[in-house]
Image (cartoon, rainbow, N blue to C red):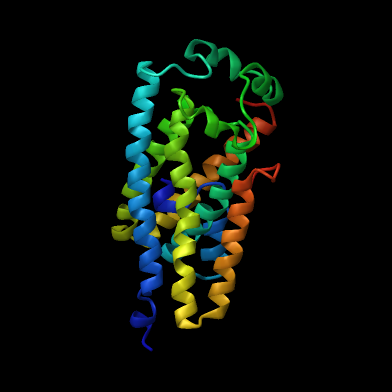
């Protein structure tokens, strides 16, 4: 196999890239709309806009307490509020990596590409663990 | 800039992949961006579930960074690797000096 041929993206890579590309644009579109709704005040937010500049100066635990910010998946119950509505776009964006990897699993099984299959499954498990809310620290 | 240099949290990724491991610069940038998309996604979920995301600041940053990344990747495709290398070195020097001055309490 020549260098140029081996450097070509495989169909699996193209599938992942396409999914991520369209998912990113969908997320941007959703975020622009929900942000406009939020700042225009069409839907009342959980944390009043005028209180935010005071709150974001606080230490993290005080911020969470004063803002009455939900822990774990509690934000899902607040999607009807102007500020938490914005999480829809963020969550879609965060889910795209997981969805992208999930679509690769059948492709790698068909190809019998076991090393890549194991890597993809491990990636999905790691991302699902992060999304589950069990972990307590950031990724970097 | 992140789209062109493959930067993000991994300031060291591109120089390590390119200068130490010998990967072509554009491949190093692509690899860095790809791995950051995974590690940053896991971090984003953790922060989201900890209640540490302020949409008022987060949404403009995300949208701006993503649109900038799309532009940066297209510039990277046509830019000369030597130019990108000098830009990466320049940005790293700038951020290093800024961090040093901050650590020393100057500026």
Residue A23 is situated, as x and y percent measured from the top left of the image, at 37, 50
Q: Answer with left or right where residue A89 lies relative to residue A68.
A: left
- The quadrant where residue A56 appears: top right
The answer to whether residue B102 shows anywhere in this view is yes
Q: Answer with left or right where residue B5 lies relative to residue A42.
A: right
* Closer to the camera in the image, A95 or A1: A95
- The quadrant where residue A126 appears: bottom right
| Residue ranking furthest to the top | A50
Q: For the point 53% across and 16% down, which residue is it?
A: A52
Q: For the point 48% across and 49% down, which residue is it?
A: A95
* Closer to the camera in the image, B29 or A74: A74
Residue B71 is situated, as x and y percent measured from the top left of the image, at 31, 47
* Closer to the camera in the image, B16 or B38: B38
Q: For the point 48% across and 14% down, which residue is it?
A: A49
Q: Is residue A52 above or below residue B45?
A: above
Residue B64 is situated, as x and y percent measured from the top left of the image, at 38, 37
Quarter containing the N terminus of chain A: bottom left
């Amino acid at each position: 196999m020549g260098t140029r041929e081996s450097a070509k993206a495989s169909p699996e890579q193209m599938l992942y890239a396409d999914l991520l590309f369209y998912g990113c644009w969908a997320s941007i579109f959703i975020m622009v709309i929900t942000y406009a709704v939020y700042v225009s005040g069409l839907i009342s937010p959980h944390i009043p806009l005028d209180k935010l500049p005071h709150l974001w100066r606080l230490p993290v635990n005080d911020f969470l307490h004063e803002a009455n910010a939900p822990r774990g998946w509690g934000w899902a119950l607040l999607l009807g509020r102007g500020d938490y509505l914005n999480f829809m776009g963020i969550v879609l964006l965060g889910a795209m990596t997981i969805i992208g990897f999930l679509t690769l699993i059948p492709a790698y099984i068909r190809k019998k590409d076991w090393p890549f299959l194991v890597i993809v499954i491990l990636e999905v498990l790691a991302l699902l663990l992060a999304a589950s809310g069990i972990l307590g620290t950031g990724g970097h | 800039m992140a789209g062109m240099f493959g930067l993000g949290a991994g300031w060291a990724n591109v120089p390590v992949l390119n200068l130490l491991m010998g990967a072509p610069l554009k491949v190093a940038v692509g690899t860095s961006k790809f791995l950051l998309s995974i590690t940053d996604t896991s971090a984003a979920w953790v922060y989201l579930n900890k209640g540490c995301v302020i949409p008022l600041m987060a949404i403009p940053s995300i949208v701006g960074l993503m649109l900038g990344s799309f532009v940066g990747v297209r510039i990277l495709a046509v830019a000369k690797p030597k130019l990108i290398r000098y830009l990466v070195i320049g940005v790293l020097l700038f951020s290093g000096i800024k961090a040093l001055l901050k650590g020393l309490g100057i500026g």
